[in-house]
Image: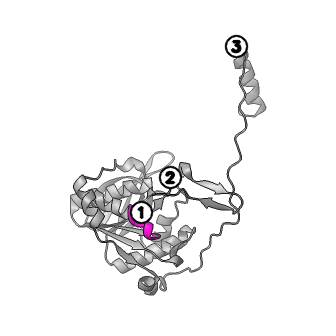
Amino acid sequence: MNVIVCIKQVPEIEQVRVDEASGKVVHPPGAEMVNPFDMYAIEEGLRLKEKSGGKVTAISVGPKENETSLREALSLGVDEAILLNDQSFLTEDPIATARVLAAGIKKLGEFDLILCGKQAVDDDSAQVAPALAEFLLLPQVLFVRKIRELKEGSLTVERTTEEGYDVVELTLPAVLSVVKEINEPRLPSLKRKMRARKAPITEWSQAELSEFIAKLPGGEPNLKSLKVSPPPPRPKGEILTGTPEEVSEKLVEKLKGLQVI
C-alpha cells in the first residue's frame, strides 16, 4: 500500500494579522507548523502502512522553510519527503497549488492512495483535495471519518455528512480528505526525531516538473486578492439587570425584536 500524504505548512493563526496599509496578511516571524488537519492524514497513512505494508510519502508545495514540516512528518514514521519549491509555485490559489501537487505526484509514479487533511487552517478553502482528484482523474471522497475496509483494488470508507455519515466504496487509486474523528495522531519518538534531522528531502523545481505540468489543464491562477481587511470589532454586549423574572422578560423582548423567536 503506497500512500502519498499532501501536507501544508501554516502559521499560528492567533498571531496572523492584517496590514491595512499594504492590504496584505502578515505572518508571524519564526517557525510555522504542519496544518493540524494534515496530521490526521499522516497518521492514517502510517496506520495503513503498518497494516498492509508499503510506504508513505509526504509531499508539500512551498519555500525551503517547508522542510520543517516535512521533517516533522519524517519523525512520525513517513518514509520519504518531497518539497515542490519554485517561485512560480507560490500562490494563494488552491487550484493552482493542486495543479503543482498533481505534477509532483505524476513524477513520483505509482501509488495506491492520496490522503489530505479536510482543509488548511489558514485559508479554510478545502479545495485542494477535490481539485487534485480532478487533475489526476481519480475517484474522490471528502471528509472521511473512518476507513472501514481495505481490499485488493478498493476501499470502503465512512463519509461525514450533516445528518450522520455515508458508506462509500471506491476503486483505487483514489483521493481522500480526512476529518479529525478518523484517528488520534501519534507523537514522534526521540530516535525518529534524530533521524529526521539528517534525512534527505527531495526537492523539485519548475525545471523538474515542467513536462508534467504542461500535460495538465489550467495555467494562470484564477484567484486574486483584491482587498484584505481585518474583521470589524465586535459590538459591546448588553447586561440585563433586575430580578430573574425581569431579566427573563427583557431577554424575551430582545429576542422578539431581533426576530429570533
Is there any visible trace of residue 45 in the rendered image? yes
Circle 3 or circle 2, nearest the eye = 2
Q: Which mark is residue 12?
A: 2
- Above or below 2: residue 145: above
User: In front: 240, or 129?
Assistant: 240
- What element does badge 2 sit on? loop
Number of other residues with Cα within 10 Å of mark 1, as a class: few under 14, some 14 to 19, many 20 or more: many
Residue identified by numbered label 3: 245
Q: Give the answer, above or below, for where 58 lies relative to 149.
A: below
Measure the C-alpha gap from mark 1 to mark 2.
16 Å
Question: Which stretch appears magenta?
Answer: 61-68
Q: Is residue 38 magenta?
A: no
Residue for point 39% across, 62% down: 68
Q: Is residue 221 left or right of residue 10?
A: right
Quadrant location of the C terminus in the rendered image: top right
Q: Earlier in the sequence, mark 3 or mark 2?
A: 2
Which of the 4 image quadrants contains residue 153?
Answer: bottom left
Residue positioned most to the right: 257
**Front tag of 1 and 3:** 1
SS assignment at label 3: helix
Give, as a three-letter code, the residue at label 1: Ile
> Mark 1 highlights which residue?
7
Q: Residue furthest front?
A: 29
State how far apart marks 1 and 3 are (Cα): 54 Å
Query: Magenta segment: does it hold 62?
Result: yes
